[in-house]
Structures are given as structure tokens and as C-alpha cells.
Amino acid sequence: MSIRIHQTDLSPSAIQRLVRRLEQTTPRSSKKAHDVVAAAKAYVEGQDDAPSRTRLTRNLQREILELRDALLDEKYSSRTTPRPAELLFSYLSEFSDAHPQWRHEYSVLNRLIPKVLSESQSG
């Protein structure tokens, strides 16, 4: 599984409908997804700054786990016990359709989400 990343050919009005639907059906998750993308961007930009790397990694991990919790709270999945990775990748794929400009950040999240979830289960 991974976040669906593509150059969208949707019209601006279709993208706005997607954004509104996410904000209306999962308002907390939509905000947390923005936070996750912002944290992924900061993580990428801070990789050359060794003192900041640990802080940025922890922040991104926290944001990913908070998004997972928001999705569970808002009952995003109709499955009774969705796997956390499925839940995150599914939602972030929809989010990517509505916000296609962050392709690089989504590719970073595709690599880091399984690692973060694995560490949260073992830690």
C-alpha cells in the first residue's frame, strides 16, 4: 500500500469539491493531514541540519500517529478494525487527490509511515 500520487487532471472546481468533502466529513483528520504534510516538508528540508534531525523526526512521527487517531475517532473506515497503515494510506490518497501539489512529501510519507507504525507497535 501507498499514497496515490499523480499529476491531477481535475479541474479546480472538482479539486475544491474534494477539499470541501474531506473538511466536512473528517474535519479533524483533514487538519491533521495538513499537519502531517507540513511536518514531512520540514523533515525533508531539515535533513542537512544534524541538530534538528531528531526533533523533526519526532515531530513527523507524532503527527502521523495523531492523524491515525483522528481517523479512528472520526470513524473514517467502515471496517471494524482497520489496519493503521491501510487507514493512513487510504485517507492520504484522498487527501493527495484534493492537494496534489505535495507529491514529494507524499513519497517521503510512503517510506516513513510503515516505519513509524512499526516503531509505535514495538515501542
Image (tube, rainbow, N blue to C red):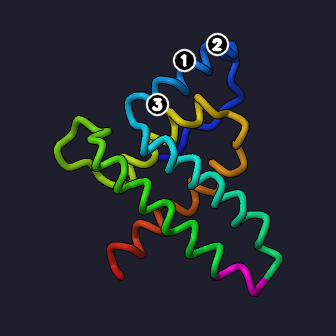
Relative side of 100 to 92, left or right:
right
Whether residue 84 is situated above or below residue 2 in the rendered picture: below
Residue wearing tag 2 = 13
Distance from the alpha carbon under mark 2 to that under mark 3? 14 Å
User: Residue 94: x and y, percent?
Assistant: 50, 33
Q: Are marks 1 and 2 in contact (CB under 8 Å)?
A: yes
User: Residue 75: x and y, percent?
Assistant: 26, 41
Picture quarter with the C terminus: bottom left
Residue wearing tag 3 = 22
Which is more N-terminal, label 3 or label 2?
2
Outermost right residue: 48
For image coordinates 50% across by 50% down, the residue present is 32
For image coordinates 46% across by 45% down, the residue present is 89
The tag on residue 41 is: none
User: Residue 96: x and y, percent?
Assistant: 59, 36
Residue wearing tag 1 = 17
